[in-house]
Amino acid sequence: MLRVVHPPEAAGTVALDADKAWQVLGRGAGIDHPTVSREHLAIRRRGMVLEVEDRGSHNGTWLDGAKLEGDPAFLGNASVLRVGDTLAVVEPVEADGEGVDRDALPGDAPPMRALRAILGRVAAGSTHLLLLGETGTGKELAARELHRLRGRGPLVTFNCAGLSSQLADSQLFGHLKGAFTGAEAAHDGLFRRADGGTLFLDEVAELDPQVQAKLLRVLETGEVQPLGSDRITSVDVRVVAATQPDLPDLVADGRFRRDLYARLALATAVVPPLRERRGDLPMWIERLERRWIAEGGGAPLSWSPEAMQDAALDDWPDNLRGVDRVVYQLRLRHGGGATVTRDLLRAVLSPGAPRSGDETPETKLDKPTEAELVAALEANGGSVRATARHFGRDRRQIYRWMEAYGLR
């Protein structure tokens, strides 16, 4: 499927017909915009891969930032196409979750549809859930939606990072007055406060090993024992734990209990990073900007096609938090209604962070031979994205290497 995501008036989807030798797309044929030619580009399936070529369009076609000229180029899932002044993303068709609020967990990218599908299935039972995702991806949004789907009890949130063993223990499981120095009053503990509902544990991998052991016992028995007490209380709590994607590595290194991981990971869902849902970026820019407009007024920003293309291809290491910061900085520096160009965008992206398309001395030193590059492309079914992961480089770097060796 080809999803046109920018500008809003051109948004829509185009089914890619695998039976056609060449499927010609353009104005009146799937992508309706004044800057798109009537026969702008063509896509075909060749074996296990897709190929795309420009059909002599007036305003050009770019694949992942590289202009298409001459021979067809490989087209993979999540490839970003700029067709004239429109932006489109190649995506597989993915089933969505039933009953999940799409406004609470927005986005049409396949990883988001898969996330909603998992939450819809998990909500029907009482299993605990482990959410894996990078910082700023929206793990708490997923936890809140799962709680809403459960439809009962309170939602209690707790960040496990940076706490001593004693403090985390008392916060989670409670304590009696005088149980330790400074315990001037009794505390019920968050498990008892969440009884009948959901307890969201963010950064669960940061818990001290002793607290991990106690958490495992509560998950297995449904019983809580406060510090300083011999009284045991039964609780009915669904735990949604969230952490970075490297939790299995922490388990392998002995820094997180394997038995606790096994208990939490009975059901696992991944909240995808923005670089895996590039087609949703224009929607998130508009959604986050609405908050700043509601707070300070002014017109929405206008994005040039080149700037939106570069934003879609960026890695966004801070994910949604990074987008929010960039949108605010653009409005702060240039005011509402400003047109965002490539230069304005680059000026507010994270300082010092490598940008998509940047080439460093290290990338030059690590350039593969032509045979190595061809072998990697063949091993990855012609996918430039997968080949980029293979070499640990950006896709634009792969295109530069292909161009240098005369490969298209």
Image (cartoon, rainbow, N blue to C red):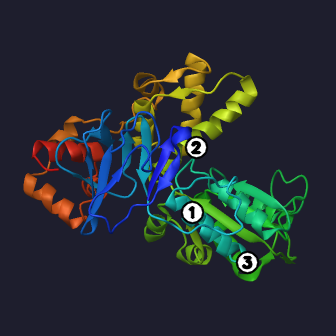
Percent across and percent down for residue 34 are: 44, 34
Q: Which residue is mark 3?
A: 126
Q: Is residue 249 visible?
A: yes
Q: Nearer the viewer, mark 3 or mark 1?
A: 1
Q: Which dot, 3 or 2, sits closer to the camera?
A: 2
As helix, strand or loop, the secondary structure at mark 2 comes to: helix
- Can you give x and y, in whole percent of width and height, for residue 183 in the image? 85, 54
Which residue lies under the disc numbered 2?
Answer: 283
Q: Residue furthest bottom?
A: 221
User: Between marks 1 and 2, how big is the CA–CA gap?
Assistant: 15 Å
10 Å neighbourhood of mark 1: few (<14), some, or many (≥20)? many
Q: Is residue 191 left or right of residue 280?
A: right
Give the secondary structure at mark 3: loop
Q: Which mark is residue 235?
A: none
Q: Position of residue 255 (x, y in %)?
A: 50, 65
Above or below 223: residue 179: above
